[in-house]
Amino acid sequence: MLIKPVDEQDISLEPEKTENPPQPIAMRRVSVDYATLATIVRQEIKRNGWEGCITSTRVVIEVLKRFGVEAAPLSVQTLVFNPFVSKHFSPNKPVPSKKALERYVSDRRGWSLGIGFEPAKPEPDKWSGHLVAVVKNGPEGVLIDASLDQATRKQYRIELFPVALEVRAALWEVGAQAFFKVNECSLIYKPILQDRSFEEFEDWTSLDVSDVIERAYQRVLIASLA
């Protein structure tokens, strides 16, 4: 638009009257895909040379906050079963009996591992738990595990990645647990509701993650608008 010099413009103190006054522009609400967010956050975490679940969950929560989504950290214990064991899990009875499960796991083709359980030899200054983010929606919600790839064991056909899982049971209630199948593996999440010990670690309190949050946010925003 050509702008006249000030002395050539018609200046009036009265606002110009129009038949159709301008309407306020509505901001487009961005719909975020939680799985994409988890994947992007994990990539940016690793780009900084980090690995931990505390840092990953912290960044997930902060990026979601920028999109107006409230999420909370949740300490969990997670059991992972490889495809051989997992094929014995049925929809009607997701978890086999303890005796049957032991038989499947002890088979040379079977394998399982636990995340978030106290190790026999705890490492100094390293948290032994596992942290995820949850987005609550009444009795249901979404569990976001951005660091699930840590459970990958290719030699046992366990190949996992960041996930966002619909929680149909109230995972944040005492005694609850949630069962999922991811890439032919079975996962069981059990919340440790009173565990806030992750808050004692630098990854949660003072590690500077601002650059990771910004990079992840920009990438998720672009992906959401595509």
Image (spheres, rainbow, N blue to C red):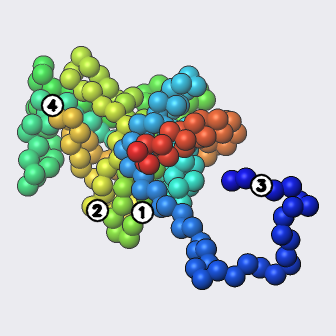
Q: CA distance from mark 4 to mark 2?
A: 24 Å
- 10 Å crowding of disc 1: few (<14), some (14-19), many (20+): some
Expressed as whole percent of the image width and height from the top left, the position of residue 58 reads 55, 44
* Residue labelled with disc 1: 136
Q: Residue at x 8, y 47 (%)?
A: 90
Is there a contact, CB below 8 Å, between mark 4 and mark 2?
no
Q: Is residue 211 above or below residue 77?
A: above
* Residue labelled with disc 4: 83
**Residue 3 - label:** 3
Is there a contact, CB below 8 Å, between mark 1 and mark 4?
no
* Residue labelled with disc 2: 169
Expressed as whole percent of the image width and height from the top left, the position of residue 138 reads 38, 70
- Side (left or right) of 217 relative to 165: right
Q: Which is in the foreground here, disc 3 or disc 2?
A: 3
Query: Secondary structure beneath disc 3?
Result: loop
Q: CA distance from mark 2 to mark 1?
A: 11 Å
Amino acid type, residue under disc 4 in the picture: Pro
Q: CA distance from mark 3 to mark 1?
A: 53 Å
Is there a contact, CB below 8 Å, between mark 2 and mark 1?
no
Q: Earlier in the sequence, mark 1 or mark 4?
A: 4
Q: Which is in the foreground here, disc 3 or disc 1?
A: 3
Query: Secondary structure beneath disc 2?
Result: loop
Q: CA distance from mark 1 to mark 4?
A: 30 Å
Expressed as whole percent of the image width and height from the top left, the position of residue 12 reads 85, 76
